[in-house]
Every structure is written in structure tokens, then in C-alpha cells.
Amino acid sequence: MIEKDQLVMMFEQIADNTDWDLSEPLIWGFFFTDASAEKLRAVAPVLEQQGYRFVDVFLADKDEPADPDLWMLHIEKIEVHTPDSLDARNGEFYRFAAEHGLGAYDGMDVAPVNPEED
């Protein structure tokens, strides 16, 4: 589980190491995992109805070739977050994963918005 103090550190690192304006919208990517690609594809429309853009369902990289397959659902949304709002969003996604019987909510990434994607 991602703790709020980890999010505070993440925001501090972004502020220290990039020229991104954290008060402006950024592309926030969110990831869910499951052993079944079909289960992940089935929840994508639910998330799209909540304003997220479906990006992909893909097979995660394995540490060992014998490890079982693990699929990832990637969604994204352009929005502004603070450590508090992102902590709340993570809580929503942990509950969403549990309610839909998914393997896990696996976290997020962030990137600047490209002007041509506005």
C-alpha cells in the first residue's frame, strides 16, 4: 500500500528534479494488476465512465521466466493532484480493485501534458 509520506516525497522529488508546475494539470497514469487480462478489460469501461482514458492491458515483465503471467491495466487522466488528493485517489482505487475482485491496484505514474494531447 502506498503511504501518504511516500507521496509527499514523490512530490518533493518532482519539484526538485523537474520543471513541471505541480499546480497545473499533468497526465496521471494508474495501474491495476490481475492474472486475467479479461477481468482487467471488463473494468476498463467502468473507469472510462468515471472520466479515465483507457491506455492498454499488457503483460507485465517477469523477474523469472517461470513466474505466472501478470496482466496490467493502464488508465490515465489529466488533472491536478496534491499529496492529499492523490492519497484519496489511491484509497478509491484500492477499494475499486477489491470490489471488482482484481489482483491489486498497483500505483501511479505522472508525466507532463504534451500540447498536442490537450
Image (cartoon, grey):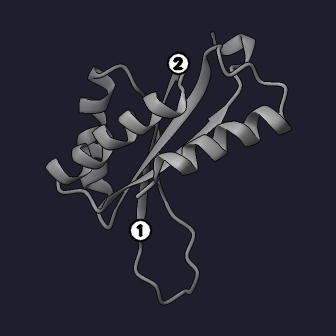
Image quadrant holding the N terminus, namely bottom left
* Image spot of residue 111 (x, y percent): 68, 32
Above-or-below relation of 81 to 34: above
Image quadrant holding the C terminus, namely top right
Residue at the spot of label 1: 70
- Residue 17 visible in the snapshot: yes
Nearer mark to the viewer, of 2 and 1: 2
**Left or right: 91 with respect to 54?**
left
Residue at the spot of label 2: 79
Above-or-below relation of 106 to 51: below
- Residue 54 visible in the snapshot: no
Query: Quadrant location of residue 21?
Result: top right
The CA distance from mark 2 to mark 1 is 28 Å
Above-or-below relation of 72 to 114: below
Q: Amino acid at mark 1?
A: Leu
Identify the residue shown where x is 74% and y is 37%.
Answer: 14
Q: Amino acid at mark 2?
A: Glu
| SS label for mark 1 | loop
Above-or-below relation of 38 to 103: above
* Image spot of residue 45 (x, y percent): 27, 31
Identify the residue shown where x is 57% and y is 69%.
Answer: 61
* Image spot of residue 50 (x, y percent): 29, 22
> Which of disc 1 and disc 2 is earlier in sequence?
1
* Image spot of residue 92 (x, y percent): 29, 38
**Left or right: 15 with respect to 29?**
right
